């Protein structure tokens, strides 16, 4: 098996993503690989309960999500760099699994590392799983890490 040169870790900053981040850092370090940290923003639509919601409200939420997401990505980049790993953040917007797979392709990732919450039954049926959609659609190896 050849070494990984570029590893993409998709994060939503959850406990499951934290466990996957540790795996991604360890694998990047062991392979002397570059680590790409991806967070996808998909702002939820505002529910106005029949009331008018001004466009500025959507813009403010999106701007806040971008600032908060970038801040949290930067913290993870710093953590990875302290561990001796070359690392770059990517803040994207759109449908999470689609953007993750497209980023892996455009950045020529050799591996995608993503956390999974281990949802099952009706929860998984109703909400789906970003991790399972990435596994189903990626043309690259995907390592899923379940939170403990």
Image (cartoon, rainbow, N blue to C red):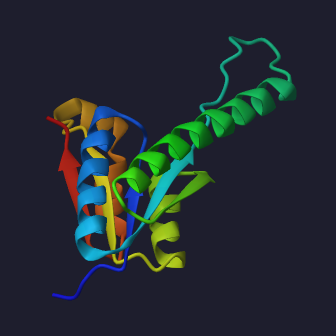
Residue 19 percent coordinates (x, y): 24, 43
In the rendered view, tell whether residue 84 sits above or below residue 128.
below
Quadrant position of the N terminus in the picture = bottom left
In the rendered view, tell whether residue 137 sits above or below residue 61.
below
Tell whether 2 sits left or right of 7. Answer: left
Residue pictured at 83% horizontal, 16% vertical: 52
- Between 134 and 7, which is closer to the camera in this rendering? 7
Residue 21 percent coordinates (x, y): 32, 49
Residue 7 percent coordinates (x, y): 36, 69
Quadrant position of the C terminus in the picture = top left
Residue pictured at 80% horizontal, 19% vertical: 53
Residue pictured at 62% horizontal, 35% vertical: 43
- Between 54 and 26, which is closer to the camera in this rendering? 26
Tell whether 9 sits left or right of 50. Answer: left
**Residue 144: quadrant of the picture:** bottom left
Task: Count how many numbered circles sit on residues in the image.
Answer: 0
Residue 145 percent coordinates (x, y): 20, 50
Tell whether 41 sits left or right of 1. Answer: right
**Residue 135: quadrant of the picture:** bottom left
């Amino acid at each position: 098996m050849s070494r990984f040169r570029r590893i993409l870790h998709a994060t939503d900053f959850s406990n499951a993503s934290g466990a996957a981040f540790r795996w991604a850092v360890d694998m990047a370090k062991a392979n002397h690989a570059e680590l790409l940290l991806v967070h996808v923003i998909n702002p939820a639509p505002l529910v106005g309960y029949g009331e008018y919601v001004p466009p500025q409200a959507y813009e403010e939420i999106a701007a806040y999500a971008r600032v908060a997401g970038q801040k949290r990505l930067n913290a993870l980049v710093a953590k990875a760099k302290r561990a001796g790993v070359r690392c770059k953040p990517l803040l994207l917007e759109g449908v999470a699994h689609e953007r993750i797979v497209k980023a892996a392709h455009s950045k020529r990732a050799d591996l995608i590392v993503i956390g999974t919450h281990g949802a099952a039954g009706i929860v998984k049926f109703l909400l789906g799983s970003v991790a399972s959609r990435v596994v189903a659609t990626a043309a690259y190896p995907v390592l899923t890490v379940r939170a403990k």
